[in-house]
Structure formats: structure tokens, C-alpha cells
Image (cartoon, rainbow, N blue to C red):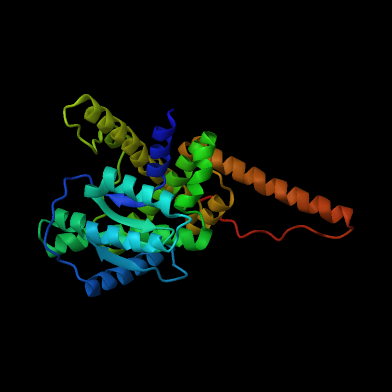
Amino acid sequence: MPSATKAVLVLALAVVGLWWTQDARRSPALVDEQALAAWVDRARAALAQGAGIVLPQDVPVVLLDAEGARARRRAFLADRPDAHGLAATVDFVTQHMFGESLLGRYLPDEQAIYIMQDTLLAQSGGDVRRAEALLFPVLAHELVHAYDAQTYGCVPEPSALVDVLQDPSRLGQLQALMSLLEGRATHASTLACRVAGIAPLPEPTVEDVREAELLAGDGSLGGDMLASLGNSVGRIKLMQYAYGVRFAQRAFAYGGEPFFAQVFAHLPLELAELEDFDRFVVRWAEDLEAQQDAAEAAGAVHGEDARTPDAEVPTRGP
């Protein structure tokens, strides 16, 4: 794979956000900051009740149009010259490939959530209730990303992608991690929507992803080739949702939110485990048994009971 193509692929895969696949057109603002804050509180409460997810810290949630988002990012990155180049490239790739369909995005370096009013309000058709119905699942999804960053520290910042660019063999692990993050956020958002009585956003299937067209060519050879490449990368990104949701559903059924602590404690996740939850469970159980055996062996050497206390591990669910 050419280095430039590999870089675009890695950068696109590592964006944590939520997309709406219809065409977006600019609409007048329908949601103000006060209304946004109220919906954030409602989404947090629903996540706690439906998915067992309680953010340990508040996270800024800002409503921005595309230009406002670019200006805020430029200002933020101006104070971080060490990370400016790579982070700016991630932002550029995100805007170029997904800009017109980007609903929300969690920025791990900024530790903030952007809600894109251009896309949100375009899809509402000028209807306040429709805008709020779209806003709720987006907020819930992005709040899960914030929770995972705060609790597990596993949402990669742009600077962390350097290692993957230097070692392509780690690309599969990045794809598996991002699939876990996106799938879990999508599943938890759906659970929160059930609590709130709001329709969740559609969960993409593998078949949907295969047919997705994010970019259109301009009829020229170069333009069509770039569009084809962009659509291929975009489909791989969207595939994270399709495979990740299935894993998240199985993990939640197995042990609820507490079991995800076990999942994150046993990273990296392999793609084969992402596609086959039972395969992950086998490795997880073997790892726990090996840790217990090592603790018991250490206790025997020192003539004391050095066994680790039983971990708070959920039992198999339905």
C-alpha cells in the first residue's frame, strides 16, 4: 500500500464521530445553547439508566457550524505545536470525507464534543422536534466516547497514530479498537433512546456499508479514482459500526457495562475476536486463569497465600 494511501486510511479510521448519510444543506439554527445543555443532561441520565454508563467528569458540548468548528480547532491546535501537523491532517481528512454528513464528533485531544448544526439542522427539514430527535442519539453516542476516554483512556489521540503509520502490522488492531468504540457507542445510544422513548438512529448493516457512496467523482480519471479511494476508506470506517455493534450487543448481554471493563483491560482486540465474541471470551477466561495460577505460584514460593482476590467479574448472561 502506498504510504500516502496508508496514512489517509489510518487517519480516517481513527476518527470518533457519527454520520448521517443523506445530503446535508444549510438550515437556520433551531437549537440554542440552553436547549443543547438540557438535552445533554437528558442523554446522560438515559445512558446511566439504560446502559449503566455514568461519566465521572463533565465534558464540554458545543454547537458549531462547519466554519466555527474549523476556527475552534485552529485556535486549540495553535497552543499545541507538537501535535498540530497530525491533528490538523486528521481534521482535514474528516472534513473532506465526511464533512457534509458529520453529525457529532468527540475530540479526544480537546476532550470536547462538537455537534454540527449544519448537518443536524439540514436533516431536520426545519422542524424543531425532528432536530431534537436527531440530537438525542448523537449526544448519547458521543458521550459514550467521552466516557471511554475518561474511564479507560482508550480513545486514540492523533499523536498516537504515528506508531501505526510506522508499523502497518498494527492497522488491524486499530480497526478492531475503533470498531469496539464505535459499536459500543452505537449500542449504548440505542439503549439510552429506549429509556427516553426516542427512536435511535439506524444501525448500519454490513450490506448497507458495502453500498455506501460518500464521495462522487467529477467524471475525470483522477477525480473518479480519488472518489473510489475515498469511498473504499469510508466503507472501512463505516464497517466499524456494523461489526462493532454485534460485539457490543454480545458483550452487554454477557455481563452488562461491568464486562466492558474486562474487555478494555484485555486489549488489544483482534479482528477475529471482534467478529466472534466467543473467541474473545475464551482468551479472557484463559488470561484470568493464568493470572490466578501466577499469583498462587508466587504465594507458594514466599510461603504465604498470595492469591489475588476474586475480581468482580460478571457471570455469563443470556
Q: Position of residue 97 (x, y in %)?
A: 28, 42
Instruction: Work out whether residue 240 or residue 29 is closer to the camera in this orientation and state it.
Output: 29
Residue occupying image coordinates x 18% and y 26% = 220
Q: Position of residue 35 (x, y in %)?
A: 22, 72
Numbered-mark total = 0
Q: Is residue 267 visible?
A: yes
Q: Position of residue 233 (x, y in %)?
A: 34, 36
Residue occupying image coordinates x 37% and y 58% = 106
Residue occupying image coordinates x 46% and y 58% = 148
Image position of 211 (left or right of 11): left
Q: Is residue 74 above or below residue 235?
A: below
Q: Quadrant of residue 81?
A: bottom left
Q: Is residue 228 above or below residue 94?
A: above
Instruction: Work out whether residue 212 or residue 80 is closer to the camera in this orientation and state it.
Output: 80
Q: Is residue 50 visible?
A: no
Image position of 134 (left or right of 173): left
Image position of 269 (left or right of 114): right
Instruction: Work out whether residue 162 or residue 38 is closer to the camera in this orientation and state it.
Output: 162
Spot the residue most to the top: 221
Image position of 119 (left or right of 69): left
Q: Position of residue 208 (x, y in %)?
A: 27, 36
Q: Quadrant of residue 281?
A: top right
Quadrant of the image containing the N terminus:
top left
Residue occupying image coordinates x 23% and y 35% = 213
Instruction: Work out whether residue 17 or residue 287 is closer to the camera in this orientation and state it.
Output: 17
